[in-house]
Amino acid sequence: MTIAAHPLVARARELADGLLSPAAERVDQEGIPPGHIEAVKRSGLLGMSAPVAYGGSAAPASVVRETAEILAGACCSTWFVQTQHQTPVLTLAGTALPVRERLLGPLARGELLSGVAYAHLRSYPRVPVRVRREADGWRFSGTVPWYTGWGLNDVLLLAGVTEDDEALFAFVEAREQPGLRPSELMRLAALTASRTVSLDLDGLCVPEEAVALRTPYARWAAADRPKTRNANPAVFGIAEAALALVEEEYAAVLRGRLAEIRRRAYALADHPVPDEHVEERLAVRAEAFTLMRAATTAAVVTGGGRAMLLDHRAQRLAREGLFLLVQGQTSASRAVHLKRLAERHDSGR
Ligand SMILES: Cc1cc2nc3c(=O)[nH]c(=O)nc-3n(C[C@H](O)[C@H](O)[C@H](O)COP(=O)(O)OP(=O)(O)OC[C@H]3O[C@@H](n4cnc5c(N)ncnc54)[C@H](O)[C@@H]3O)c2cc1C
């Protein structure tokens, strides 16, 4: 079966063309309506990486990437809320702890939507969220700087670092409760619609049976690091959507360059050893950003003055592209991206 013919890709396309894309400028300004979340839950896409035995599809990586491109190109806010769910699914699929039997089925079948709060672990040795053992479970304290999907998600996978330097991930109900207080919804340059907040944790009590992963921090970080080096498929989705607004004469040239970098990015993502080709992965990731920015800029230039109107597609895609530049950024990818930007500036003199 070709990727395009896969049922999940067809469903993503239906959702994108029938619902998300036509409403994207309105959603960008007003927020994701509950009906769109319901449609995502019904689509089967929430279980794409989940085991078949739990109601998921166990789809190959190529299909997961294609659906990400389609959804991000249609409505980046909805894609982002949807994509957060995949880490909790994969975490549950990889554990034998009791929480797997309680939550993997409902998450795989789209009965529950999960968010995540773990990017702050990457700032180690700074520890924004600490976890302390108590007789009846664990207590979380500190500040989660970014949490997307507040009011949309049913549960959240929350991470912190224990006194023994372990990364501990546990599921929590995604609502205000003793020890968990959200900030106001953030007003952002892009993705305000995704309902992002910070979370103040003040001794939030989490029972042992909610724990999904507990492992030495160094081991978690070693497995996490490769994930942040590859180009994000959403970057190609935004670029494609932008090029659809550009005159074909110019779009075709950028599309050709984009296809080549996409091919390299996905070959690296499929490479069996995720720790190899580190420099090349980061360089390809940065180059994908360069092409995405060229595509969104071309869309703005094509749109002219009207492109500045908040209901114009070009400016929305350009702003969403800005968000992708920093999403999942680590000190390593940050350094490579900045270095390449400086090199380009030099060579243009
Ligand atoms: C709108 C939005 C929604 C988000 N939603 C979620 C969510 O739901 N769940 C979640 O877990 N995360 C979420 N994130 C977090 C996102 O993935 C992080 O922004 C990303 O990981 C980068 O982290 P940062 O902004 O804290 O660090 P950045 O400033 O991008 O820096 C990356 C790393 O580089 C290092 N660094 C920073 N400044 C310097 C410097 N001057 N010199 C050298 N090194 C430096 C730090 O170690 C840092 O960890 C969201 C972010 C945004 C913007």
Image (spheres, rainbow, N blue to C red):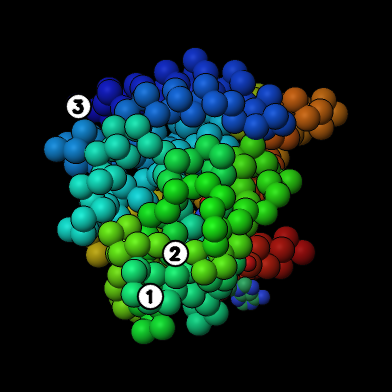
- Numbered label attached to residue 280: none
Closer to the camera in the image, 174 or 40: 174
Q: Residue 275 appears at what percent x and percent y?
A: 31, 69
Q: Is residue 186 above or below residue 54?
A: below
Q: What whole-number distance in Å separates the C-alpha atoms at marks 1 and 3?
A: 51 Å
Q: What whole-number distance in Å separates the C-alpha atoms at marks 1 and 2?
A: 9 Å
Q: Residue 281 appears at what percent x and percent y?
A: 42, 62
Q: Is residue 148 visible?
A: no
Q: What whole-number distance in Å separates the C-alpha atoms at marks 3 and 2?
A: 47 Å
Q: Which residue is mark 1?
A: 134
Question: Dots 1 and 2: beta carbons under 8 Å?
Answer: yes
193 relative to 105 in the view: left or right:
right
At label 2, which amino acid type do we have?
Cys
| Residue found at the far right of this picture | 305
Q: Is mark 1 within 8 Å of ligand 1?
A: no
Q: Which residue is mark 3?
A: 1
Mark 1 or mark 2, earlier in chain? 1
Ligand 1 quarter of the rendering: bottom right
Neighbourhood count class around disc 2 (C-alpha, 10 Å): few under 14, some 14–19, many 20 upward: many
Question: Dots 1 and 3: beta carbons under 8 Å?
Answer: no
Identify the residue shown where x is 39% and y is 70%.
138
Identify the residue shown where x is 38% and y is 76%.
133
Mark 3 or mark 2, earlier in chain? 3
- Badge 1 marks a residue whose secondary structure is strand
Identify the residue shown where x is 65% and y is 63%.
341
